Image (tube, grey):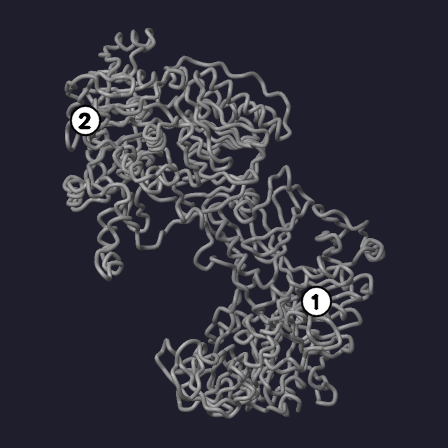
Amino acid sequence: MVEALSPLKTVCAPGRYGADGEAGIVLGTRAIRSLWQIAGWADFETAAADLLGVLGLNGLGDYRTARVAGAVTAWRIAPDKVLIEGCGDLTGYGSADLAVLDLSHARTLIDLGGPAARDLLTQIVTVDVRAATFKPGAFLQTGIHGVGVLIHCIGSDDFEIYVPSTWAESLWEVFCENALPHGLLVNGAG
Amino acid sequence: MRRLDTGGRLNRSKPLSVSFDGKRLAAFEGDTLAAALLAGGVSPVGRSFKFHRPRGVLSAGVEEPNALVHLREGGRHEPNVPATMVEAFDGLVATGQNAWPSLDFDIGAINDLFSRFLGAGFYYKTFIGPFRHSTRFWMMCERFIRRAAGLGRAALVADPDHYEKRSAFCDVLVIGGGVAGLSAALPAARAGADVMLVEQDFALGGAVLSDPAGGAGDKWVAKARAELEALQNVRVLTRTTAFGAYDGGVYGLVERVADHLKAPDEHQVRQRYWQVHAKRAVMATGAIERPLVFGGNDRPGVMLAGAVRTYLNRFAVLAGENAVVTTNNDSAYQTAIDLARAGAKVTLVDMRENVDADLTRLAREAGVTLLTGHGVLEVKGSRRVTAAAVAPIDARGRAKAAPRLVSVDLIAMSGGWSPTLHLWSQLYGKPVYDAASACFLPTEEDAHRLRAAGIAAAAQTLDEVIEQGFARGVEAASAAGFAGDSGTRPEGFATGPFWPATMSPLWAVFNADGKCRGKAFVDFQHDVKITDIDQAHLEGYVSVEHLKRYTTTGMATDQGKLAGVNALSRMAELRGLPIAQVGTTTFRPPYTPVTIGAIVGHDHGRHFRPTRRSAMHHWHGENGAVMIEAGAWMRPWYYPEPGEDLRAAYIREAAHVRRDVGLVDVSTLGKIAVQGPDAAEFLNRIYVNGWKTLQIGRLRYGVMLREDGFVFDDGATARLGEHDYFMSTTTANAARVLAFAEQLLQTEWTDLRVHVTSVTDQWAAIAVAGPNSRALLTKVTGADLSREALPNNHFTTAEIDGVGVRVHRMSYSGELAYEVYIPAGYGRPVWETLYAAGAEFNLRPYGTESMGALRIEKGHVAGQELDGRTTLKDLNLEGFASKKKPFVGAVLSKRPVLEDPARPSLVGLEIAGAIGAKAGSLLYPATGETKGHGDGWVSSATYSPALGRNIAMGFLKSGKDRIGETIRVVNFLGNETLKAKVVSNHFFDPDGERQNG
């Protein structure tokens, strides 16, 4: 089987860019293991209970906090929708009460880190990303340059940003351009 | 004018090289350009807008109307920059503007001689008539008039600098870093609130910076600053102006990150635009001094008294050796005293009869000559003030006796102060006039989240300034949820007299007959004289809003900073009303000009909007494709071979598909997963045709309407499983269809258990078309793709290089064709596998232009036909509409006007001759006049390699009944008329033998 290509393959070139000194921004990417959306209706929680249990997740969660169980991470992106990474193939869980949808290729992940990571976020999103309000474990859905994204805070200054794959290259360039004043280190694929 | 050897807040160890109009000026770190101009004795520094009168520096702040200059050169050139706001830097280059050939000798000054003809609204009266074609004549004159009456010249080359935008959130935003602002920030920060303190100057201190350096005020500011800087919850932004206040506690700021440098450091930005969301805000913006109105008050050498003091104490510039200070309030006494102490000969002309005895004693002790009950009636001197005509005045400001001349080189004037309440007014409307302090003040309501403190609220003493600031800080923090310990209020320090409690409402000095001598200006920037206000009144203008626009008073960058109250005072006098009743205009953002660059940030050039790329995007570029924008996407337009242009390439590509096989990237098609037990019912409602019988493994073409009955979009939908459908839409309408579906499900059809999710990013898609397409795909997939196993409108799953794909049997080109859907990450590898395997089948890629040619040959409609104005009937698609079920748009599509048989309907056109038709051409009968909108229009046109002729599709009145008729195709833009035969739009293989074969 051939290897899947990241939309960032052409542009994610490891190296040091922008302002001198310590790199304020570190950018990279990693392959998304598997990404599925599960969706239901009024009885969503019941319909999803078995699947969530198998994945080690307890309940649907809230709309700002990611739920993590081992290699599985879940984000409740709407009252009746949960996005799950690292869950394997969920085809078999689809039913009249639970819609499952493979989105593994629909999103591309941009890793954002470095001491100026939050500063960079303030340049490209219009939501509150201060350390006191956007803490590790939290996530938010917002727009970058008009494109809907999901930002997961995984450390004090570390973020994983899920962007639609067809927009990924363009958004990567937006990240890089905004990162230059801080000094940019591109790590490449993780 | 001279630089003093000592004093000021300058770093004299860092001299700077500054030039103005080629003249080198001595400056130091800490200077402004205006200070350097004054110290260098430069006069005039500008020419006025309309009359080109020589002008000197008037102020020391953002309100400067005269010293507007061209700053920098090349791409960094910037016009209309107030020299008062330009921090001096080494290598600063500035030039005068609005003058030719030079500021010293300006031809445009001839306008001053004709000023009586250039009064208020002269353009409304002048630029009409008297000729028959006067409009054309005046349009011709416009460019000359604009050149004569204008300000700076913009650069025509690209700006090389970068700009940045940021969003910030805080609990308390304090606007203004003077004593009031610092007093507000301290308690809010101590209570634990997240505080942003912004100051437009590069230094904190506000009015303290105009006091002699090293005083108690400096120590007070340093202590407050040190405490704030030590707190983690405080952000202090200097060189930052809050220019706009908006609903929801949103404020627009612009930070001049590198304007004090010759150029930004590498990779750094020049300016940063901040959008701040604040729970509460304190407006500690101080006040702007008002000029007095008297004859020649615009002459170089006439300055605002506070500015004279600022130049003296902050920049060590003595603006005159022989000064008259004229005032209607106490604040100018400090200027007079400081000037006298610096060695100037000072005459203080106070318009008031009675002045505080302690103040007059202090002035006399400093050597100031005091004249109370007097005013400056007129300024003598043309290029610079040489004398002041001083006269005793009555309570209305009218001269009671003949004036006497006082030789001066400086007149410092103070007509009181106007609180800087622009931001408050932007949010809450018109302020109210406070007769006691003779200025407009903000009001206060419970709902107001922005509140004023200090001089901005007309505080009368320094203690009151600190008290107000502190109280506002405590109040704001508490309202934001931080009611903790705010500490104790800072102590005050000794300072000069304030204005509000002591001022007289006198604002102008007149002759005994009530008229000013010579030209007396109320708005320096627009050359608006007091006589212009009088004229507007005579012509019936009673509303301040109309007065402003008719006379241009307070417009442009002034925004009421200097001109407002004096103009209103005159209007009030003329109307016999108190100012409070006359009212004021509303302030609008921005408070000061904001560069377009700061607003745009990075969103320009290739980042004007994001670009969408398919998984195969880079393959196209690497293989010679010429790309074209298609909405947000970049798509391969055509793949030229050596020597080919667009026409040659697309004709070759289309012919190749009909003969062999081609592949085209169709990843841009909108793709929507429709899931849920009611998915079929959803499709039944949103499409005009029926879906309940569609079996798993099959797909169906569908058309959807808008609610108004016009066709919205079309596409094929496949049934993947019991509850899973895969809908495709046109590239252009993908987002709109998804949004429409979501809207219906969330608001209208809440009974349906259906989810719709975009999967456009999940799937790359390749159309393989042509007689050899089956053989090619059979080879690479190993699947049975025979007509029997996979008829048209069916799909199957297969593998290519181990990648699971879905093969849809459907055709857009009219050829035997398939669409291959691939998980996007494998899109390029699968494309490359197909391309390599296709060599033996003579496979070639083709682009959107040839794809369009093929679909026109087949007669398929696309975006050009689905333009939002056409109905099913217009498109000959009415047969698709089910009569057994309701669907979106069903009712309104039956409106009589849409059922009119004479409406233009879709036809094919065989164009006679070698020249093809142009889309947008109008259709007319073969004979008769070609007037009006004709009988229809051409929607799509191409050369058909299959037919060997030019063809087109279009909409023609009663089209179905005109098959066989010859009509004219008129392209008015190209002045071209062609003949065409009306035919069916199904030009090629109308029975579908090729696509179904």
Mark nearer the viewer, 1 or 2? 2
The quadrant where residue B659 appears: bottom right
The C terminus of chain A, quarter of image:
bottom right
| Picture residue at 20% right of the left edge, 16% below the top | B345
Q: Earlier in the sequence, mark 1 or mark 2?
A: 2
* Chain under callout 1: B
* Chain under callout 2: B
Q: Which residue is identified by label 2? A: B379
Q: Which residue is identified by label 1? A: B673
* Image height of A148 relative to B370, above or below: below
Three-letter residue code for mark 1 = Ala
Label tally: 2
The quadrant where residue B780 appears: bottom right
Pinpoint residue B505: horizontal percent, then vertical percent: 34, 21
Pinpoint residue B829: horizontal percent, then vertical percent: 61, 73
Q: Which mark is residue B763?
A: none
Whether marks 1 and 2 lie on the same chain: yes
Give the side of residue A29 with respect to residue B227, left or right: right
Q: Secondary structure at mark 1?
A: strand
| Picture residue at 40% right of the left edge, 25% below the top | B439
How far is the residue under mark 1 from the one under mark 2?
80 Å
Pinpoint residue A67: horizontal percent, then vertical percent: 75, 49
